[in-house]
């Protein structure tokens, strides 16, 4: 593949493969990891500065895309539950895999997940006191054999908790948790602050958010937003 | 690892090295040396340790062999050559050759790390000090002889004053020697290490080749770790292990995707034991040997790796990092076991986790500083929780949990598990606390012991959670403990845990979890047969919107079934917030609220229960506060207060209400400061608003409203509350005036067996009720009540209007009020306007009948002292009712201008008490005019002058003035003659005008006349109304002349 061709396809390709690359693991991926933080324009520059060898490697990633889609789906499938609570810890949005597919998760398991999500609020409250830097993403909060819980704490003390299963062999990368949570947060902001009829503290009902959450759970094909 | 690098010594003519050997070995690591590292890595201070041994040929060989490249520790790093010589010539002739041959031997094996030590034991040196040009020393000679092919050859020759012989002067020289030794040694070390690193790196690159074996690589890289550890570079040593850790993890993860390498397959097949982590020894040789022999299992490899990481972390004094790493380590291992699909017997993993967690915890405890307990606990709590969970898993598996069947199969399982744990590493040691394995074995031995251990671990976990402030997590563990007690059939003990949990979820409003917990609580109470609580929780569940309809009706049935078992002595009080949330409370009544009037309240109540329920009564009770004296003083404000009656908090209320939500108060401000103008909005009660409400919410409150507030309440009885929204109207008749505020609501069901209360309310409502007596006022024609200019004249009939203000009373249609006047005042009611006109029409008939004589009371037939007035329509509070009256009073026999006072009293029955209350109004009546008499005597003639002076503003016409003797002396009238000088014309009199009447009195005899009667007819002249010209009023006045006897002079 010649260099100009690559450059042309880069913005669309890289952006649409954003999720795929995240899921792709191994050494080769690491050198491209900076991509995800870059805008499309920066990406172009990056590609130009790449050596021929790197471009070849990049091509090989694209060739492997079939496998990556599976990997990405697998990893999206590993999201177990999502809870958004407001500053008073009242839940405003709760979704578990149980809500989508009762066969994948029993009611009892569903309950246990919620119990653990609630208990994780303790750790967020603890971090709330310590958190000196202004990064809302809190990282890994709680983990157990079968799951990990990642959290986000906004400046207005909105908390988003994401529970991910660790049973699936695909590694759940920290950066993916970060981007997912930030995506959810900005969507939450959209549906609450742009809606004049939303009463703070009440349950969030929004098609837009539902769609996003569905994609976070890996239930729609559109996981590249 | 006790393998040190080797430094050889070769000495032919001296025994100094042997003598110094021990000294060097101990002195060398005493001081550090700065290490400039390759690849731009940061400079480190390192300590060197060596073995100092005599030269042997074998050391030379190790460098060339391929094995030599693969070892780092224990290899020979430096060769030293020692000789004792102080004379250059001697050196040239005897020693030089020997040195050359030694060096050649080294070169043969490509060794360039050498050091020549020239021992100077001569004592002459001191005396030679005075020499001007010192001869070149042996050392200089040696330096010039061996510069070949080594850059820093000059450093590789050092002279040492023999410290054995000459201890005092040898100190400096010895130190210098040591420094030089360190330097050269480090160079060699550095060189070897770099070479080794490259080798390891190369090996790592080969990791995907078939022949590559992780265990070999492990030992290889670990040697670097040992090397760093020996140099006291614990951090770098740890990096080696971390790299190994990551490499291994990557292999395990990749094994899922790609074909696992052979060595990994072997590892999978080899897991038969699950001995816990052992951190007691710095290096577990047993495990290391297994790794070296490639016979270690996954758990053994992990155990070893983690124990080494621990050791190095503790060397760096980072016990907290050890505890942070511990939990991910355990999780990761379990995960790896899963990924690799290693088949271990059930419970084996749990055993391993429990043992390892306990081991780590015990290790951490030894390094624990009580001042950092809290921070430290944050890291260890995860381990406790994990260990607890695993113990529970084991208990369930081996039938040790209460209520399970502990049969022989279970015992068999336990035996199998214990066998897999291997030997207790602490078996020989005496420990203060039992070793992890002892603890676990004891717990698995029998159900009682298990319960004890389980409770111990659980309670420890809960208390640690609480200690570090993670209440939710602690209570979640409490939940499991509650289930444990339930299994033990100790439901009473599990309830506090569940109630705690309920509190958490109620506070956080996690309704799904709240409902789930309440189900558990209900189950407990059903077992305990606590009817009250069963009813309460069943009702709560029945109203929970998170449950299915069928479930909710099921719970309602449970509640209903249990109601009959309640006793009346002990009524159940339930908070209604969840079952019957309040939609809104509003006053239906409008306007001003007054006492004794019915007030209506609209209560919008929702019902979350699935059925219609009939309640005996519902009452919204109020707190009452009388008006404060200040408020009472500002009586005009009462109307204002009444108008603002729904303000909240009421301005007149002084009660400090805690549960008010403070609203921000804003004020605008503008400052002119330094010619800059600031304008803005300021919130002056910011602190109050942002104050955190510390009010603890204790879940559903079941407070009984205090009796005092029950006196005032809106009530409605026999009501049905259907599912969904219900609008209820409640009534209340306040008796006292003051501020009322809504405090709570109480619903009574089934003869006070159950009442639902809601207190305090989130919606706040308060209002004022005022009470004011009716008032009676005199008003003028225009309706003004300012009557200072209004003049009522006694004598002629007067139209006046009295205005009754109902105050806080209301007069119903048909109510009767009575007006009573004082004796000399007569009244007549003007029925209405039309009649009044009729009456005035009568006047135009000039009926002489209208002529009134004050003395003839018969003419006052239409007038009376008392009038009853019937209300045809109702009179609402603070409404006016005008009573038009005609009043007539006797002409005041009073000569002063102030007039007379009369009283009109209005009596009305009190609506409530039926008592007759009355209010009175004083009327000032002024006389139309006043008369005075003067007697003038002119010699013998006597004249009587009567002056009539008008007092009122009215105009009068006067006529028919007449003077006669008083009635008592009537019979004597003939004796007197009054000759009038007066005109018969009518006289018009204005205010302050005086009319003089004059009579001459002639007496037939010289009798004395003392009593005279002056009479006059008068009529009012009104410009507005045409008055009856024929009508008149008569005026009489008695005069008494004290001494009329004329005196003749």
Image: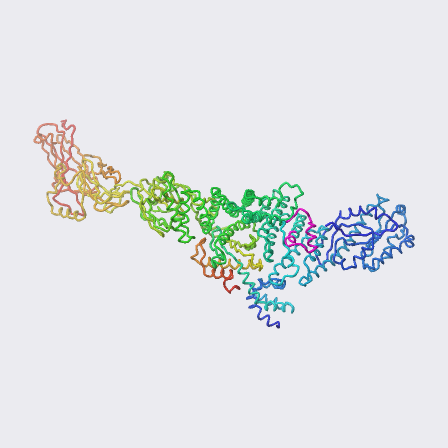
Stretch in magenta:
B277-303
Residue B360 lies in the magenta-colored region: no
Q: Residue at x 14, y 27 (%)?
A: B1047
Residue A65 is left or right of residue B697, and the answer is right
Q: Nearer the viewer, residue B712 or B819?
A: B712
Residue B583 screen position, x and y as percent: 37, 50
- Residue B653, position as x, y percentages in the image: 38, 42
Q: Is residue B868 left or right of residue B566?
A: left
Q: Is residue B579 left or right of residue B820?
A: right
Residues B937 and B753: in front is B753
Marks counted in the figure total 0
- Toward the front, the furthest residue is B408
Kindly give the residue lying farthest to the left in the view shown.
B974
Res. A87 in view: yes
Tell me the residue at 9%/33% (across/down): B977
Q: Which quadrant is the C terminus of chain B positioned in? A: top left
Q: Nearer the viewer, residue B454 or A155?
A: B454
Q: Position of residue B572 (x, y in %)?
A: 39, 42
Residue B378 makes an appearance in the image = no
Percent x, y of residue B335: 59, 55
Q: Is B293 a magenta residue? A: yes
């Amino acid at each position: 593949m010649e260099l100009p061709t690559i450059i042309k396809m880069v913005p669309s390709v890289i952006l649409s493969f954003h999720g795929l690359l995240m899921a792709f693991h191994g050494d080769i991926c690491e050198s491209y990891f900076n991509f995800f933080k870059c805008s499309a324009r920066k990406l172009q520059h990056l590609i130009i500065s790449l050596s021929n060898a790197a471009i070849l490697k990049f091509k090989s990633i694209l060739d492997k895309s079939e496998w990556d889609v599976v990997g990405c789906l697998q990893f999206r499938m590993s999201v177990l539950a999502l809870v958004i609570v407001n500053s008073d810890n009242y839940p405003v949005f709760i979704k578990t895999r149980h809500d989508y597919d009762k066969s994948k998760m029993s009611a009892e398991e569903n309950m246990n997940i919620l119990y653990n999500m609630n208990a994780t609020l303790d750790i967020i409250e603890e971090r709330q006191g310590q958190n000196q830097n202004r990064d809302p993403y809190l990282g890994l909060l709680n983990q157990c054999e079968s799951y990990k819980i990642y959290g986000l704490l906004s400046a207005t003390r909105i908390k988003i908790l994401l529970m991910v299963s660790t049973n699936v062999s695909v590694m759940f990368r920290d950066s993916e948790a970060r981007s997912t949570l930030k995506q959810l947060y900005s969507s939450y902001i959209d549906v609450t602050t742009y809606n004049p009829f939303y009463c703070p503290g009440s349950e969030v009902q929004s098609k837009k958010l539902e769609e996003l959450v569905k994609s976070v759970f890996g239930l729609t094909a559109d996981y590249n937003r | 690892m006790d393998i040190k690098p080797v430094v050889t010594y070769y000495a032919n003519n001296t025994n100094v090295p042997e003598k110094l050997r021990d000294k060097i070995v101990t002195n060398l690591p005493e001081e550090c040396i700065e290490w400039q590292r390759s690849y731009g890595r940061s400079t480190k201070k390192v300590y060197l340790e060596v073995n100092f041994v005599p030269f042997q040929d074998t050391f030379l060989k190790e460098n060339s062999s391929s094995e030599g490249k693969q070892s780092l520790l224990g290899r020979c790093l430096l060769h030293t050559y020692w000789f004792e010589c102080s004379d250059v010539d001697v050196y040239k002739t005897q020693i030089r050759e020997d040195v050359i041959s030694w060096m050649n031997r080294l070169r043969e094996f490509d060794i360039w790390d050498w050091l020549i030590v020239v021992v100077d034991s001569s004592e002459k040196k001191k005396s030679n000090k005075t020499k001007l040009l010192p001869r070149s020393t042996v050392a200089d000679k040696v330096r010039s002889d061996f510069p070949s092919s080594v850059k820093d050859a000059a450093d590789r020759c050092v002279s040492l004053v023999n410290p054995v012989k000459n201890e005092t002067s040898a100190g400096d020289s010895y130190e210098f020697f040591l420094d030089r030794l360190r330097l050269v040694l480090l160079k060699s070390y550095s060189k070897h290490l770099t070479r080794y690193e490259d080798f390891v790196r190369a090996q790592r690159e080969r990791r995907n080749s078939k022949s590559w074996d992780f265990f070999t690589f492990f030992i290889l890289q670990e040697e670097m770790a040992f090397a760093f550890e020996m140099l006291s570079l614990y951090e770098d040593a740890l990096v080696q292990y971390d790299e190994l850790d990551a490499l291994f993890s990557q292999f395990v993860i990749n094994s899922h995707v790609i074909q696992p390498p052979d060595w990994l397959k072997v590892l999978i097949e080899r897991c038969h034991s699950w001995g816990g982590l052992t951190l007691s020894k710095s290096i577990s040789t047993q495990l290391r040997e297994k790794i070296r022999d490639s016979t270690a299992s996954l758990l053994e490899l992990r155990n070893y790796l983690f124990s080494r990481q621990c050791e190095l972390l503790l060397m760096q004094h980072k016990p907290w990092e050890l505890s942070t790493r511990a939990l991910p380590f355990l999780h990761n291992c379990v995960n790896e076991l899963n990924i690799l699909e290693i088949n271990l017997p059930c419970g084996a993993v749990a055993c391993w986790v429990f043992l390892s967690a306990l081991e780590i915890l015990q290790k951490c405890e030894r390094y624990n500083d009580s001042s950092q307990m809290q921070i430290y606990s944050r890291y260890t709590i995860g381990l406790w929780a994990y260990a607890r969970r695993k113990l529970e898993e084991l208990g369930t598996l081996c039938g040790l949990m209460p209520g399970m069947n502990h049969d022989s199969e279970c015992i068999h399982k336990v035996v199998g598990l214990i066998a897999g744990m291997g030997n207790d590493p602490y078996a020989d040691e005496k420990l203060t606390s039992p070793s992890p394995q002892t603890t676990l074995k004891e717990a698995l031995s029998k159900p009682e012991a298990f319960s004890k251990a389980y409770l111990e671990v659980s309670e420890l976990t809960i208390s640690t959670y609480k200690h570090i402030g993670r209440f939710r997590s602690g209570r979640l563990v409490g939940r499991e403990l509650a289930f444990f007690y339930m299994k033990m059939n100790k439901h009473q003990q599990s309830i506090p845990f569940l109630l705690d949990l309920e509190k958490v979820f109620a506070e956080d409003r996690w309704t799904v979890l709240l409902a789930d917990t309440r189900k558990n609580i209900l189950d407990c109470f059903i077992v305990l047969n606590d009817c009250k609580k069963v009813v309460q929780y069943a009702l709560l569940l029945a109203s929970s919107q998170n449950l299915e309809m069928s479930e909710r009706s099921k719970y309602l049935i449970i509640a209903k079934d249990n109601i009959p078992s309640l006793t009346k002595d002990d009524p159940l009080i339930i908070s209604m917030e969840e079952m019957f949330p309040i939609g809104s409370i509003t006053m239906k009544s409008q306007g001003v609220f007054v006492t004794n009037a019915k007030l209506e309240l609209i209560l919008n109540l929702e019902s979350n229960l699935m059925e219609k329920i009939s309640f005996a009564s519902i009452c919204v009770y109020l707190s009452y506060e009388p008006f404060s004296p200040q408020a009472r003083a500002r009586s005009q404000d009462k109307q204002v207060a009444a108008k603002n009656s729904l303000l909240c908090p009421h301005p007149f209320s002084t009660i400090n209400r805690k549960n008010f939500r403070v609203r921000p108060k804003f004020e605008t401000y503008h400052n002119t400061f330094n010619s800059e103008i600031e304008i803005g909005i300021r919130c002056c009660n910011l602190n109050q608003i942002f104050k955190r409400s510390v009010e603890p919410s204790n879940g559903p409150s079941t407070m009984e409203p205090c009796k005092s507030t029950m006196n005032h309440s809106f009530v409605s009885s026999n009501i049905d509350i259907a599912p969904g929204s219900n609008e209820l109207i409640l009534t209340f008749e306040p008796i006292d005036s003051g501020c009322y505020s809504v405090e709570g609501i109480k619903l009574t069901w089934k003869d006070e067996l159950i009442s639902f209360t809601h207190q305090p309310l989130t919606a706040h409502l308060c209002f004022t009720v005022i009470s004011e007596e009716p008032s009676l006022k005199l008003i003028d024609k225009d309706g003004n009540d300012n009557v200072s200019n209004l003049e009522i004249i006694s004598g002629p009939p007067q139209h006046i209007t009295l205005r009754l203000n109902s105050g806080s009373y209301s007069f119903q249609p048909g109510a009767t009020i009575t007006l009573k006047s004082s004796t000399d005042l007569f009244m007549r009611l003007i029925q209405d306007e039309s009649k009044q006109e009729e009456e005035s029409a009568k006047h135009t008939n000039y009926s002489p009948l209208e002529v009134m004589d004050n003395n003839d009371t018969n003419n006052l037939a239409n007038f009376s002292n008392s009038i009853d007035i019937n209300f045809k329509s109702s009179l609402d509070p603070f409404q006016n009712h005008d009573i038009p009256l005609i009043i007539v009073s006797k002409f005041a026999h009073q000569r002063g201008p102030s007039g007379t006072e009369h009283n009109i009293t209005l009596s009305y029955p009190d609506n409530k008490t039926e008592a007759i209350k009355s209010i009175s109004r004083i009327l000032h009546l002024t006389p139309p005019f006043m008369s005075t008499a003067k007697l003038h005597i002119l010699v013998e003639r006597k004249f009587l002058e009567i002056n009539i002076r008008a007092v009122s503003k009215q105009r009068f016409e006067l006529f028919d003035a007449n003077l006669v003797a008083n009635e008592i002396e009537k019979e004597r009238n003939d004796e007197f003659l009054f000759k009038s000088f007066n005109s018969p014309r009518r006289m018009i009199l204005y205010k302050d005008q005086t009319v003089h009447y004059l009579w001459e009195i002639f007496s037939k005899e010289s009798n004395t006349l003392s009593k005279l009667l002056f009479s006059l007819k008068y009529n009012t002249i009104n410009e507005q109304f045409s008055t009856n010209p024929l009508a008149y009023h008569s005026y009489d006045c008695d005069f008494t002349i004290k001494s009329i006897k004329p005196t003749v002079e």
